[in-house]
Amino acid sequence: MKVALVGATGMVGEVMLKVLEERNFPVTKLIPVASEKSVGKTIFFKNEAIEVVSMQEAIDMQPHIALFSAGGNTSLEFAPKFAAAGTTVIDNSSAFRMDADKKLVVPEINAEELTPEDKIIANPNCSTIQLVMVLHPLNKKFGLKRVVVSTYQSVTGTGKNAVDQLNAEISGDADAAKVYPYEIFKNALPHCDVFAEDDYTKEEIKLMTEPKKILGDDSFNLTATAVRVPVQGGHSESVNIEFENDFDIDEIRNILSETPGVTVLDDVQNKIYPMPLYADGKDEVFVGRIRRDRSQPNTLNLWIVADNLRKGAATNAVQIAEYLVKQDLV
Ligand code: 11C
């Protein structure tokens, strides 16, 4: 497969390179693409130095697959051009996620919706992916009625400059360049992405809309509060789920233990629960603190953690690419 990587020098792009290598994706030619100022730089893939090319050069090479992680505006402008040249684009931005004619895919849940006609496929938001990996198996068994999610999101979700801001503040540089409106070290910002409709942030709106599309179910209610915390290893989520039907707590644990891609870490007597420190660099979605909500029937509390750059972005995109190859869709 000829694979273009658009946004190859960004944080997600770098993890995509690593994931393609680790999973031994059948790359015959890797085409790194980045903004004009990075053209001519080199990146390393499988110990080989490869020159970054411009968007047009990459389109002209007619890759089979293009993995995009360069922001929504770049995707809106260039994904259709790759698609017109016959390339299948897997886009990690929010540009196409809610388009009625684009698929929004988490392979463990809905990859079978994909057809050879899908030339632009959307990769969901990171905090959405880890949430739906847990909601999906439980929805099938007990029926979702209402979900309340509060996130504790890693600065890696914002990008390299945010990681630099946190590290500079940790090292005592009070005048560090700020990506966030406030200091992030020793702080928690109830503000991920920009404020949009009804005083919700865009991140919260993604969390309230994308799961319904991925699960193919808009019969349940979902509300979200997204918070940025001074953490680097992954996003955490406190989730309260009301079901249509009652459940047995052991059955919940069994279902989640048997869900591919999900690992249950839930032994509070031994202080075992998911944390970003341990999710960092891993592909699984970790779930723990599984317990009945005492305040009302049919309701569950749990805690989900995943590395937002891996299953939340790069790994999910590469899994989509793997599915396309396996099913002969590219
Ligand atoms: C964050 N979830 O942590 C965002 C990053 O729509 O793909 C990813 C944004 C997106 O801020």
Image (cartoon, helix red, strand yellow):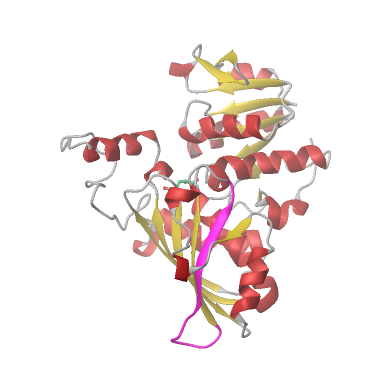
- Residue 189 figure quarter: bottom left
Is 222 rendered above or below residue 285? below
Q: How many marks?
A: 0
Q: Can residue 261 be seen here? A: yes
> Looking at this view, is 39 or 22 the one in front?
22
Task: Inspect the magenta stretch and tell me whether residue 267 lies in it.
Answer: no
Residue 139, given in percent of the width and then of the height, sits at 65, 72
Quadrant of the frame with the C terminus? top right
Residue at 61% from the left image edge and 85% from the top image edge: 246
Is 40 rendered above or below residue 86? above
Q: Can residue 329 be seen here? A: no
Q: Which residues are magenta?
A: 283-298
- Residue 138 figure quarter: bottom right
Outermost residue to the top: 40
Outermost residue to the right: 328
Left/right placement of residue 98 relative to residue 198 reads: right
Residue at 33% from the left image edge and 52% from the top image edge: 229
Residue 71, given in percent of the width and then of the height, sits at 48, 37
Residue 304, given in percent of the width and then of the height, sits at 50, 61
Outermost residue to the front: 270
